[in-house]
Amino acid sequence: MARGMNHVFFVGALARDPELRYTPNGTPVCDLTIAGEDQVLGSDGQTRSLPWYHRVGLMGKPAETAAEQFKAGSAVAVEGSMEQRSWDDAASGQKRSMISIKALRVDGVSRPESDLVRDSGGGFRLQNALNEAVLVGNLGRKPELRYTPSGDAVVGFSIAVSESWKGRDGNWQEKTHWLDINAWRELAELVANLDKGDSVLVHGRIKNETWTDRDGQKRNSTKVEATRVEALTRGPAPSGAV
Amino acid sequence: MARGMNHVFFVGALARDPELRYTPNGTPVCDLTIAGEDQVLGSDGQTRSLPWYHRVGLMGKPAETAAEQFKAGSAVAVEGSMEQRSWDDAASGQKRSMISIKALRVDGVSRPESDLVRDSGGGFRLQNALNEAVLVGNLGRKPELRYTPSGDAVVGFSIAVSESWKGRDGNWQEKTHWLDINAWRELAELVANLDKGDSVLVHGRIKNETWTDRDGQKRNSTKVEATRVEALTRGPAPSGAV
């Protein structure tokens, strides 16, 4: 399995004031909702403005600094990674998971007031925002190509992105994040040729989808809309310890 | 001074075979020349194909694997950082420095033969390549706006990008890389409003320039052509140890 790569870059505005909380063991966590509008060139040659709202979590001392420094409408640059968290839903007994962004750093950005858009919920979004993900992971299963009624090829697939780090006890820890990707047209056709287990490099923008499930509950998902997919080749078997 | 950020992403082809060498203390180093063509939309609305050739160095065990796995014409994806190396030129007695890319990882990419271009020197370049740098650093001096004969604003400036890491002895090491950036038109005008010491986030593509100096020697430089510049704000003074 390919070593995972997981980078996220945002430039956006705080949709609302930051929320500072503390974990049971006293670690500060700052929850931010970062919002922006991407200018995306459609296949019809038209530029559309696509709003996005993403939850970003910052931990440790920088969390307290961010809670002090930023407020609703502050423009910020975020470097982070996509993180999948899973839990058992007490009400339904079902396994649930969500994707959020773990911030490595959040910097204030100097933007004129006129770059801010006030949304219908009283929040803020930043125009000319940036929303970029760069990932390497392995396909969970063979992707299936579908076609929209207008004939566009589309493929939805999941990649397993591994993360490893040295824990406080000096031992290596590993975690796998399952991330959902969408690809359209030529990219979709390229992806449809790949197999379960194949490694891919994905560039794209992170988007939200909200829908109502069969039980009438509001659900939402976070996916990557791919702008580039590269199939990675398998290297030779390693001839020794790394 | 803002903490530095320094990411480089390439998708390109090996212009020629990789070169494997060993440092005096036995560490393997693989030198790669990665080459590609970017499709860049000019201010005149025309798309131009801009070729690039960049030196990439990979160290340790992955260097030996790369030297085995890749050859001239292999398509690869590189994740790395821009690195400035300085030395005293024995011939002229002058201080010289160059920018190269330090690779964190190099993965093989599956591309059809038809994506390769053979250049006039017998090397290879990859079409539909990727060439992206994401940097945070501090301005070395106040930038000076200039205008081309056709009236386009342009600004050249340098940023100090700090890098820190924990050495083998457990102590933190620090190094500063001075990187040259070019910005054009609206971006140039934004940058011209900034001052010495200000922090910026820069997105751009890495380009080479070759010229002949007064002594008739061929020289070349590596710069970032900015596609986005964001001025970072100064945070509040930290209220305690991080």
Image (cartoon, coloured by chain):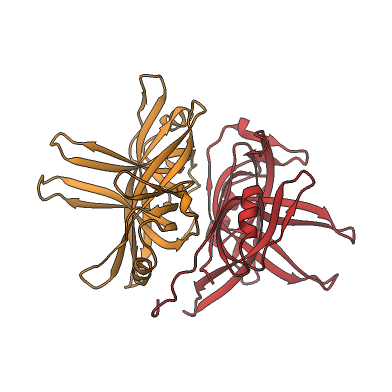
Chain colours: A red, B orange
Q: Quadrant of residue B92?
A: top left
**Residue most extreme to the front:** B114
Instruction: Provide residue A211's location: percent of width, then percent of height.
Output: 81, 53
Instruction: Provide residue B149's location: percent of width, then percent of height.
Output: 35, 19
Q: Give the residue displayed 62% in from the left and 63% down from the top.
A: A83
Q: Which residue is at the front of the view, B16 or A41?
A: B16
Q: Give the residue displayed 60% in from the left and 52% down from the top.
A: A67
Instruction: Provide residue B51's location: percent of width, then percent of height.
Output: 39, 42
Q: Which residue is at the front of the view, A32 or B206?
A: B206
Whether residue A185 sits left or right of residue B50 in the image: it is: right
Is B132 located above or below residue A234 in the figure? above
Q: Residue B1, can we see it?
A: no
Tally the marks. Answer: 0
Whether residue A233 sits left or right of residue B65 in the image: it is: right
Q: Give the residue displayed 14% in from the left and 49% down from the top.
A: B89
Quadrant assignment for the C terminus of chain A: bottom left
Q: Which residue is at the front of the view, A220 or B78?
A: B78
Whether residue B108 sits left or right of residue A192 in the image: it is: left
Instruction: Provide residue B160's location: percent of width, then percent of height.
Output: 35, 46
Q: Residue A59, can we see it?
A: yes
Quadrant assignment for the N terminus of chain A: bottom right
